[in-house]
Amino acid sequence: MQKIFGFIIIVIFFTSCSSDSDETYFDNPELSLRIPIDFPEVNSYVSLNKPTKYGTELGEKLFSDKRFSADNTISCSSCHIQGNAFADHNARAIGVEGRVGLRNTPPLQNLMFLKFFNWDGSRLQLETQPLVPIITHEEMDSSILEVIGKIKEDASYKELFKKAFGDQEITADRIYKSIAQFEYTLISANSKYDKVKRKEGQSFTESEAAGYVTFQQKCASCHSTELFTDQSFRNIGFPLNTDSNEAGRGRVTGIPTDFMSFRVPSLRNVEYTAPYGSFGQFATLRSVLDYFDNGVLEAENLDPIFKNNGNRIPLTEQEKENLIAFMKTLSEKDFTGN
């Protein structure tokens, strides 16, 4: 997979440091990530598993290894494709034997700033997330013990585990930590929008500027901060997946008011992550905006932004065009390789 470490500056030092499990990293320099000063606070778990040179290299290799799946056909990168901002183009994720998953594949970007992972927020720590696709029947349908059995005699892995952790032992904890380290480096903060904001010689077109005004008026309450998400869970009245027992955040909390609420998606690189919605209900950004304008599904727990405004966000045709133009300024071609 194409290297994308444009935002990583390696700070070389050869003093050992310790992780939360007191494993010693030998001659394995910590990576100093260029974090934008106006981004939200880094997730506290990152301090327990800071990206290192070899930990990140190992994580990227594991991320692309198809032996993680039962039939050796699916890796993390099979669904999390760089050109799609580490999402994919399917309405719902496709796993081993063509099995169709429950939800649309979420993009992977700016993960070190997130408080919740998965669309329903079922994971609070990135290091615990990889087990979910590994054991899920519709995804990899495997087990971490099976994965370890497949790679434990691989000489290249033995070398990398030793470089990252001080010895060749391959454990589940080390696998999870390495993948998380790689994912922590996926920082997207150099789009046209960022360059305009930093006054680096670029400016919005008339349509982009008008779209930014509309965005601030009608979208920014949910898609806030420089992540373009407030990380809340909301029911915004999208069409339901009648083929499943989907309940959104309600699956995690068991609280009726969380039924069909999902984590607000970031709009960064949204141009590359179609289709949209929890199970790919919308093929294009325009169809999402048309749906908001025409009126969303009624629900007792429908977000107040819709419920208090006739179940819709009214938008003119010109506003829709301008909004899409602005959202495309959040695309970062270097990050996606496009």
Image (cartoon, grey):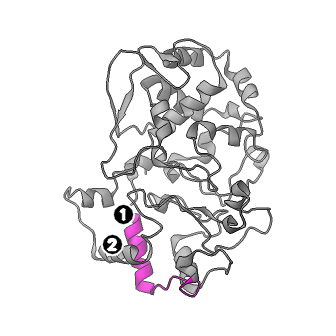
- Checking the image for residue 208, the label placed there is 2
CB of mark 1 within 8 Å of CB of mark 2? Answer: yes
Residue ID at (44%, 38%): 185
324 drawn magenta: yes
- Checking the image for residue 160, the label placed there is none
> Which quarter of the figure has residue 149?
top right
Q: Which of 297 and 149 is in front in this view?
A: 297
Q: Give the range drawn in magenta.
A: 308-328
User: Eyeballing the image, is 121 above or below 242?
Assistant: above
SS type, badge 1: loop
Residue ID at (49%, 16%): 24
Q: How far apart are marks 1 and 2 (CA)?
A: 8 Å
Q: Nearer the viewer, residue 123 or 66?
A: 123
- Checking the image for residue 329, the label placed there is 1
Q: Give x and y (percent) for residue 23.
A: 53, 18
SS type, badge 2: helix
323 drawn magenta: yes
Earlier in the chain: of badge 1 and badge 2, it is: 2
User: Is 285 on the left or on the right of 204, as rendered?
Assistant: right
Q: Give x and y (percent) for residue 168.
A: 59, 13
> Which quarter of the figure has residue 321?
bottom left
Which amino acid, by three-letter code, is at mark 1?
Answer: Thr
Q: Which of 285 and 161 is in front in this view?
A: 161
User: Is 225 on the left or on the right of 280, as rendered?
Assistant: left
Q: Give x and y (percent) for residue 96.
A: 75, 43
Which amino acid, by three-letter code, is at mark 2?
Answer: Glu
Residue 80 seen anywhere in this rendered image of the structure: yes
User: Is 174 on the left or on the right of 336, as rendered?
Assistant: right
